[in-house]
């Protein structure tokens, strides 16, 4: 526009709006499709935001943070952020393009964190369980959802072997063990599940388990995913807004290659990546204490640098990790002083810190 001060452009304003997060989430308001449009007239900027909620406090908060952010741009004099509630959506508004338009947060659950890997058997369930229990030990109200239809292992690792109860109002009660509220898709599936459960059935099961479980108030819900980028992953990211995903890998090239695919999937749906956990990184000889890099060194580090996300930790290969998993006595509780348990606790502390910052460390890509 001719009368704009030199340098003030829409893209400049968009860039600043990308630093404004949706309250309570790590998504910025541009990536999540909340910013509907803007116009710049001289030194005045008008921004229109379209919410997918009718919550007045969210609207008020967004109006304030948006106006503050835009006002700080050199050359801007006045700002008006017009925030439209869900019921005020204009027909044909870009709300329909909002990738989170069909999502609703789980009431009472502050952060949903997925634990994922491209390749099977790298230790997702072990990592998910120990991080969840470590978070619980540090005082956070934590839940653990086993969303692995192909091989649910959380019930075994958490020492639960019961059938879930459905209450009179059709809510499913989670199991509580080791201080963690737990639920598993495995409880609801028959032996042939991986063969017959496809597409829509998987979607429905994951959605129900997430939404119909009586989680109560949780600081964090950790979700153990099946390997790869299939129906469960897609359903999850389309059902609830994820705070972020933790990628688990072993150090070999093959596992790392699959991490790339996993990272791509989460990025494509704008879910931030919290970081990488490298598992089975090295083996410490119980006799001489020598540390051996079983696979190779530096794979997780290199991948984390490539993706621009933190390497949250490196877990040693230790038979006690496997034994405690099989016994349903998570390592961080049963052997808290082992190097692997110390590393899990440090990872949980880092995750807590990242969650409390409220920002996803990974840059968020906009997918059109
Ligand atoms: N650091 C470790 N040291 C020793 N054993 C481990 C370690 N991490 C995981 N394991 C063992 O390796 C096996 C696979 O781990 P886990 O089930 O956690 O992997 P996963 O990625 O969830 O597998 P899947 O893809 O089948 O779901 C388990 O028996 C587990 O106890
Ligand atoms: Mg698993």
Image (cartoon, grey):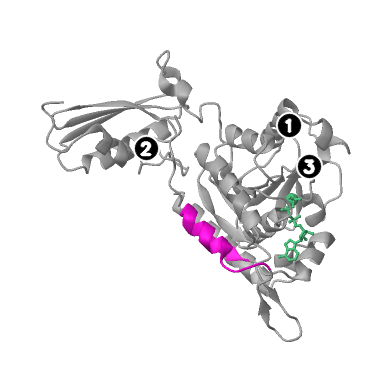
Circle on res. 191 = none
**Residue occupying image coordinates x 40% and y 41%:** 21
Report which quarter residue 186 is drawn in: top right
Asked whether the residues under the numbered discs 3 and 1 touch, taking CB atoms below 8 Å apart as contact, a structural biologist would say no
Circle on res. 150 = 3
Location of residue 354 with respect to 209 vertically, above or below: below
| Ligand 1 occupies quarter | bottom right
Report which quarter residue 165 is drawn in: top right
Residue on which the image places disc 2: 61
User: Start and end of the magenta stretch?
Assistant: 295-314
Would residue 86 appear left or right of 108 to someone viewing this image?
A: left
Asked whether the residues under the numbered discs 2 and 3 touch, taking CB atoms below 8 Å apart as contact, a structural biologist would say no
Q: Earlier along the polypeptide chain: callout 2 or callout 3?
A: 2
Q: Earlier along the polypeptide chain: callout 3 or callout 1?
A: 3
User: Residue 32: percent from the left, percent from the top?
Assistant: 44, 34
Which-is-in-front pick, marks 1 and 2?
Answer: 1
Location of residue 71 with respect to 138 vertically, above or below: above
Number of numbered discs visible in the structure rendering: 3
Report which quarter residue 131 is drawn in: bottom right
Disc 3, SS: loop
Which-is-in-front pick, marks 2 and 3?
Answer: 3
Which residue is most to the front?
Answer: 253
**Residue occupying image coordinates x 66% and y 71%:** 282
Residue 308 sits inside the magenta stretch: yes
Location of residue 234 with respect to 299 vertically, above or below: above
Q: Nearer the viewer, residue 307 or 7?
A: 307
User: Residue 178: percent from the left, percent from the top?
Assistant: 74, 58
């Amino acid at each position: 526009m001719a009368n704009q001060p030199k340098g003030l452009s829409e893209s400049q304003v968009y860039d600043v709006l990308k630093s404004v997060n949706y309250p309570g989430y790590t998504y910025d308001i541009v990536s999540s499709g909340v910013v509907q449009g803007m116009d710049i007239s001289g030194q005045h900027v008008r921004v229109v935001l379209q919410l997918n909620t009718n919550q007045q406090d969210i609207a008020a908060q967004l109006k304030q943070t948006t106006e503050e952010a835009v006002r700080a741009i050199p050359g801007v004099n006045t700002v008006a952020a017009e925030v439209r509630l869900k019921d005020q959506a204009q027909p044909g508004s870009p709300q329909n393009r909002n990738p989170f338009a069909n999502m609703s947060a789980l009431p009472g659950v502050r952060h949903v964190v997925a634990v994922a890997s491209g390749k099977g058997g790298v230790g997702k369930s072990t990592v998910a369980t120990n991080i969840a229990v470590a978070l619980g030990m540090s005082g956070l109200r934590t839940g653990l959802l086993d969303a692995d239809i192909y091989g649910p292992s959380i019930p075994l690792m958490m020492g639960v072997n019961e059938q879930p109860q459905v209450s009179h109002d059709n809510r499913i009660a989670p199991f509580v063990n080791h201080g963690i509220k737990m639920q598993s898709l495995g409880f609801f599936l028959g032996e042939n599940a991986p063969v017959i459960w496809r597409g829509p059935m998987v979607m429905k099961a994951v959605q129900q388990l997430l939404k119909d479980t009586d989680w109560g108030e949780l600081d964090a819900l950790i979700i153990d995913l099946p390997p790869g980028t299939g129906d469960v992953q897609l359903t999850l990211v389309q059902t609830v807004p994820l705070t972020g995903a933790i990628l688990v890998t072993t150090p070999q090239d093959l596992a790392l290659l699959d991490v790339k695919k996993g990272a791509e999937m989460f990025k494509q749906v704008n879910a931030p990546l919290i970081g990488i956990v490298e598992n089975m990184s090295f083996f410490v000889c119980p006799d001489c204490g020598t540390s051996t890099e079983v696979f190779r060194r530096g794979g997780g580090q290199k991948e984390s640098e490539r993706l621009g996300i933190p390497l949250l930790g490196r877990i040693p290969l230790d038979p006690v990790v496997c034994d405690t998993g099989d016994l349903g006595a998570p390592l961080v509780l049963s052997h808290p002083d082992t190097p692997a348990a110390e590393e899990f606790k440090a990872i949980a502390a880092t995750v807590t810190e990242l969650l409390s910052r409220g920002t996803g460390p990974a840059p968020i890509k906009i997918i059109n």
